[in-house]
Image (cartoon, helix red, strand yellow):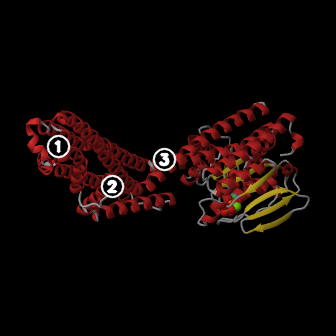
Amino acid sequence: MRQSMLTDEQAQFLREEKEALSEIRLALAEIDVPREALDTLQEAILQLDELFLIVIVGEFNAGKSALVNALLGEKVLLEGATPTTSRVTLVKWGEKIAEQLVDENFAIYTYPLPLLKELNIVDTPGTNAVIRHHERLTNEYVPRSDLVLFTTSADHPLTESERQFLERILAWGKKVVIVLNKADIVESETALKEIQTFVLKHAANVLGDTPEFFPVSARLAQRSLSESDSEERKRLRAASRLDDLDRYITATLDDTERLRLKFNNPLGVAENLVTQAGRAIHDQSEDIKEDQKTAAALETTISDYERDLKSELTPRIAEVENILYKLEQRGLDFFDNTMRLTNIQGLMRGDKVRAEFEKKVLADVPKQIEEQVQRLIDWLVQRDLQEWQRVMTYVQRRQAINIDHIVGAGIEPREIRRRELIDSMGKTVQRVIETYDRDKEARDLAAHVETAVAQTALLEVSAVGLGTIVTAAVLSTSLDITGILAAGTLAILGIFVIPYKRKQAKDSYKEKMTSLRARLLDTLTTQFTKESQNAVSRLKDGVMPYVRYVRSERERIEKGEAILARLRQRLSTLRAHSQAVIGK
Ligand SMILES: Nc1nc2c(ncn2[C@@H]2O[C@H](COP(=O)(O)OP(=O)(O)OP(=O)(O)O)[C@@H](O)[C@H]2O)c(=O)[nH]1
Ligand SMILES: [Mg+2]
């Protein structure tokens, strides 16, 4: 865009627009928009500094090259009945007529025509040609254009593939003008009107608006140029109707209108990319839905599991506590019943008292405790296996969905990654379940508990089974007390001290039992909490890579959505601003 044509305000806007679009491009790069799309936007931004660009598109053989030749008034470009134009061809102003084949996809023609000082024209290879490569060239060039001359031929006006192409052009936010070429082959004005109605109706359906429409004959226009008879020349020129299109390009499309189209061109491109990115993100968001459900189910079941273990542990350990309370009570009763004056004979025999104590007080407490702890272990092991099986059902459900979707074309890398994670999680869970040996798990757990109980300095002995440990602990506690009743002591102090001794024995016993209970319960609680946590951790290790991936994907998608929302806002502000500085 020639800066001299711009007001200060417009020049300022142009700078802002370029800056904003570069930022938009960077933001799009952040959300994985494909490289080619970013390049397209870059090209469109650069195009702001170039002359107004008209791109002629249409199916092969529609007469695009003939139309450019007619507009230029010279047979510059090659025409032909078969797919002819193979390069995107830029026609621009130059002092001399020259042709430069830049590469196999691109050519530049220079021509000393005044109109070309104001605008550039691009001829493109026809769409729907057998040579798909041509179509690609055309699609790539469309985003750069400021105005598209959509050329359709009167012998097959607006074919289905043309209609689809029109849709693609519209997606880029282009201003489209429809040229119906080869009007000379239409036999009557009525037939031409019919064609016009048909084309405009369908084009309006696509574009949402009735576009400008120019029926022309490039052939008659060209013929008029070589006609020597001036009357005939005029007649042919009039019959070609090319002047209407000419006038539209030179006059109607005045500076302001061109500026408007130019300013809006890269906005349309950016909007289209945002729309495409939005669609891609939406699809990804749909794709991840099943995984979100699965991940949420896994997280819930594991946290429920964790909570259950915690909440069930307390009452189960309380049962052990209860056994110990009863033991204490029986001990106290024992002292009350045994340490009596009437039983002085019995008391004199410490070993007998001790045997009595073991039989009546300790009784089967060790066995009870052992059984209770075993129940706790069995419950923990059972619950653990059950949890793995539950996790397996969620994994299998998710895998079944993958199998359902296996038919269908190319799987995306993201999808592949997700499937890998699901499969590896499935394998881990499967392996754990298949090799789960309940007896061994229970044995290992029991061994851990015994070691822990032995290690809490309840006893300085190595573990020989929980029951034995408990027996020894209780007896060592109680033996002190029965020791108070040693025959010698009684003999020396006589019978008067018995009530006092009884109280002392009971207090001491109570105190020691309290401490024994506290230590035993504390050890069991600590150990079982640790075991529960291990079980939960193992489960988490199996599923967390997947859960974390799903979470991070969700975050990525949300971030993308937020960026796109911001870009939409930014683009609409830019559009409004563009409108304001152009004064329309
Ligand atoms: N009857 C008639 N024939 C035309 C007219 N314009 C072009 N033709 C003929 O239509 C054929 C195709 O013209 P081109 O200009 O090469 O068509 P194109 O759209 O550039 O084709 P590709 O380059 O292959 O995409 C040629 O034989 C032209 O002579 C016209 O106005 N009337
Ligand atoms: Mg051509």
Earlier along the polypeptide chain: callout 3 or callout 2? 3
The nearer-to-camera label among 1 and 3 is: 1
* Mark 2 Cα-neighbour bin, 10 Å: few <14, some 14–19, many ≥20: some
The nearer-to-camera label among 3 and 2 is: 2
> Which mark is drawn over residue 491?
1
Question: Which amino acid, by three-letter code, is at mark 3?
Answer: Ser
* Mark 1 CB within 8 Å of ligand 1: no
Q: Is residue 116 left or right of residue 273?
A: right
Earlier along the polypeptide chain: callout 1 or callout 3? 3
Name the residue rendered at 59%, 60% in the picture.
128
Front-lying residue, 267 or 122: 267
Gap between marks 1 and 3 measured at Cα = 90 Å
Residue 302 locus on image (x, y percent): 36, 48
> Which mark is drawn over residue 452?
2
Image quadrant of ligand 2 equals bottom right
Residue topped by disc 3: 285
Numbered disc 1: secondary structure = helix
Question: Which amino acid, by three-letter code, is at mark 2?
Answer: Ala
Determine whether label 2 and label 1 are within 8 Å by CB. no
Front-lying residue, 227 or 348: 348
Determine whether label 3 and label 2 are within 8 Å by CB. no
Earlier along the polypeptide chain: callout 2 or callout 1? 2
